Image (tube, rainbow, N blue to C red):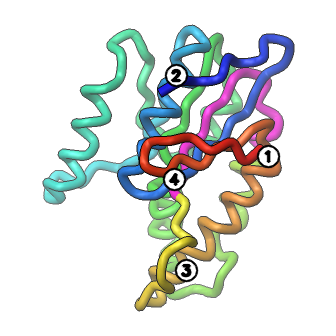
Amino acid sequence: MSHPAPDPTRPARTLVLGGARSGKSAYAEGLADASGPVRYLATAIPDPTDLDFAERIARHRERRPANWTVVESADPASDLADPVPGATLIDDIGTWLTARIDARAAWESPRGAITPDADALVAAVTTYPGRLVIVSPEVGMDVIPATRSGRLFRDEIGTLNQRLAAACDEAFLIVAGLPVRLK
């Protein structure tokens, strides 16, 4: 998969969107790796009883170069307050959003209950002075979820993705492993 060269004249914020198993993480990893040292903010909170999710995390870990700095991050907005040389990769916004909804016990709350968290993240992305690559799921192209929690997640991630895309210099949609430049 080819990756566009970063523009060395300005810090670039890149949003990489895609569906499940689209290749979005691998594409984002290639973008970040092309920028020198990488700080990888892993937003997933592993559950040792969820063997399928543990296997997904293991595949991501195996793919990452050993010289990357990995930070298990439940709060990427705070981590972005501390810029680092090279690139910072956040993977992914969907697991972060799920954890924030869980933390606020907001699955039955009205839309917007996690707005303060989203505001903090978007502000941190907007002001981050270095190379930043963000991975987020695109879930709005499927059927309407049958459950309230599924619809809540779909709506919240859709709104957040719009805000992140506006804050980023470029955005890609990954479909079947192929990048489509959106911005």
Residue 18 tag number: 4
First in sequence: mark 4 or mark 1? 4
| 60 in relation to 20, above or below | above
Q: Are marks 4 and 2 in contact (CB under 8 Å)?
A: no
Label 2 SS = strand
Based on the picture, tell me whether residue 2 belongs to the magenta stretch. Answer: no
Precedes in sequence: disc 3 or disc 4: 4
Q: Are marks 1 and 3 in contact (CB under 8 Å)?
A: no
Highlighted range, magenta: 123-137
Instruction: Name the residue that disc number 3 marks.
Output: 152
Residue at left offset 52%, top offset 33%: 28
Secondary element at image label 1 = helix
Query: Which of pointers 4 and 2 indicates the residue nearer the eye?
Result: 4
First-in-chain label (2 vs 3): 2
The residue lying toward the viewer, choosing from 144 and 53, is 144
Rendered view: 85 above or below 39: above
